[in-house]
Amino acid sequence: MSTFDIRRARPGDERCLSFLGQATMLQTYAGIISAQNLNDLIETEQTREDYRALLDDPNVSIWLAEIERGQAAVGYLALAPRLGGETTGGERGKAVLEIKRLHVLHRFHRNGLGKRLVNEAIKEARLRKADRVVLVVNALNHEAIEFYRTYGFLKTGDTSYRAGDMDYPCYLFSLDIGRPAIG
């Protein structure tokens, strides 16, 4: 079994974040999103510049998971304020943070790494006094949907995500963290 370290991403990590984002998007969405739209999505949202902007934003927190042997990055999570005030099933005015991106290379799925990354995000959300953590997931990404449900996220709505020239169906998920954790 592999050992992983999780740390806060910092300026200079945009290269590995971009590579990870590109690789995991291809692994996850090949066969779900058309090749042209997938390439467009990667070229517009998985660039070094995109990650540099996220790293420079004081409202965004990113955790990077590295495999101990070789210290290669194998996953990450980005947490940011929910834009537009939409709380996906909660009351307006409540503090809401969104998991903008959670990507783990397929080879490292099902070993607790995703849960560890989400745990970091939940700890941060509580420190920021958030009441809820939300996310959007592609409706055909069944593995991710099952992961979020197992963690306790609830489906609170439907939406879509534009990639290239198409809108793809997505679900809104939400986790109420306003009450203290049990245990």
Image (tube, rainbow, N blue to C red):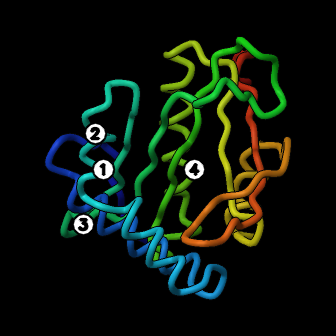
Q: Nearer the viewer, mark 3 or mark 1?
A: 1
- Residue 15, by quadrant, is bottom left
Q: Are marks 4 and 3 in contact (CB under 8 Å)?
A: no
Mark 3 is on which residue type?
Answer: Ala
Q: Amino acid at mark 4?
A: Lys
31 vs 66, nearest the viewer:
31
The total number of labels drawn is: 4
Query: Dot 2, how many residues are within 10 Å of its Cα: few (below 14), some (14-19), or many (20+)?
Result: many
Give the number of the disc on residue 122. Answer: none
Residue identifier under label 3: 72
The answer to which of marks 2 and 4 sits earlier in the sequence is 2
**Distance Cα–Cα, label 2 vs label 4:** 22 Å
Instruction: Identify the amino acid type marked 2.
Output: Leu
Check the picture and name the quadrant holding the N terminus.
Answer: bottom left
In primary-sequence order, the first of circles 3 and 2 is 2
Q: Position of residue 173 (x, y in %)?
A: 76, 44
Q: What residue is shown with label 2?
A: 55
The answer to whether residue 2 is seen in the rendering is: no
Q: Give the distance between the C-alpha atoms of the residues marked 2 and 1, in whole angstroms.
A: 6 Å
Q: Camera-side residue: 145 or 31?
A: 31
Counting residues from the start of the chain, the first of labels 4 and 3 encountered is 3
**Mark 4: which secondary structure?**
helix
